[in-house]
Amino acid sequence: MHEFGACRVVRQKLFASPTGSKLVVVVWKSCSAKVPDSTQASIVARGRTFSPEDTPTFVSVRGHLDVVVAWSSERAVRIGFIPEPGEVFKRDQRAGDVAINYE
């Protein structure tokens, strides 16, 4: 668990790519009553340390949701949420050299 400003960030799951060279890191972020809770995901290279301050997120949705991640290859990943998010704050189609498909 990390503190990020006035927010608490709790790492939920890691999903390794087929060769293990990359990881999707899923976190839950809880802030003040003025900022809604969120589920976020980032991609980091294996061996790198995840930092909520320095690792950019490629998706952020309202609430604490379960995340389903399936790597198609080293450069493509599918991601879905259970239940489907009611509000999406950020939804990038790429994270570095990785294409992201949402289901």
Image (tube, rainbow, N blue to C red):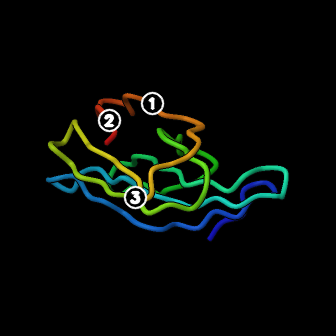
Residue 3 falls in image quadrant: bottom right
Q: Is 10 drawn above or below residue 76 in the view shown?
A: below
Circle 1: residue type: Asp
- Measuring 70% from the left and 61% from the top, which residue is drawn there? 30
Report how far apart the C-alphas of labels 2 and 3 lie in the structure: 14 Å
Q: In the visual, does 77 lie left or right of 83? A: left
Q: Name the front one of labels 2 and 3.
A: 3
Label number found at residue 67: 3
Name the spot of residue 10 as percent of width and height, x first: 58, 67
Kindly state the secondary structure of the residue where label 2 is placed: strand
Name the spot of residue 17 as percent of width and height, x first: 22, 52
State which tag comes first along the sequence, 3 or 1: 3
State which tag comes first along the sequence, 2 or 1: 1
Q: In the visual, does 84 lie left or right of 2? A: left
Kindly state the secondary structure of the residue where label 1 is placed: loop
Residue designated by label 2? 100
Density class for disc 1 (Cα within 10 Å; few <14, some 14-19, many ≥20) is few
Q: Is 93 drawn above or below residue 71 in the view shown?
A: above
- Measuring 29% from the left and 50% from the top, which residue is drawn there? 22
Residue 16 falls in image quadrant: bottom left
Q: In the visual, does 81 lie left or right of 40? A: left
Circle 3: residue type: Val
Q: In the visual, does 50 lie left or right of 14? A: right
Name the spot of residue 92 as percent of width and height, x first: 45, 30
Look at the numbered discs 2 and 1 and tell me whether their residues touch, using CB distance below 8 Å. Answer: yes
Circle 2: residue type: Ile
In depth, the one of 47 and 29 nearer the eye is 29
Name the spot of residue 52 as percent of width and height, x first: 60, 53
- Measuring 72% from the left and 56% from the top, which residue is drawn there? 4
Residue designated by label 1? 92
- Measuring 55% from the left and 44% from the top, which residue is drawn there? 60
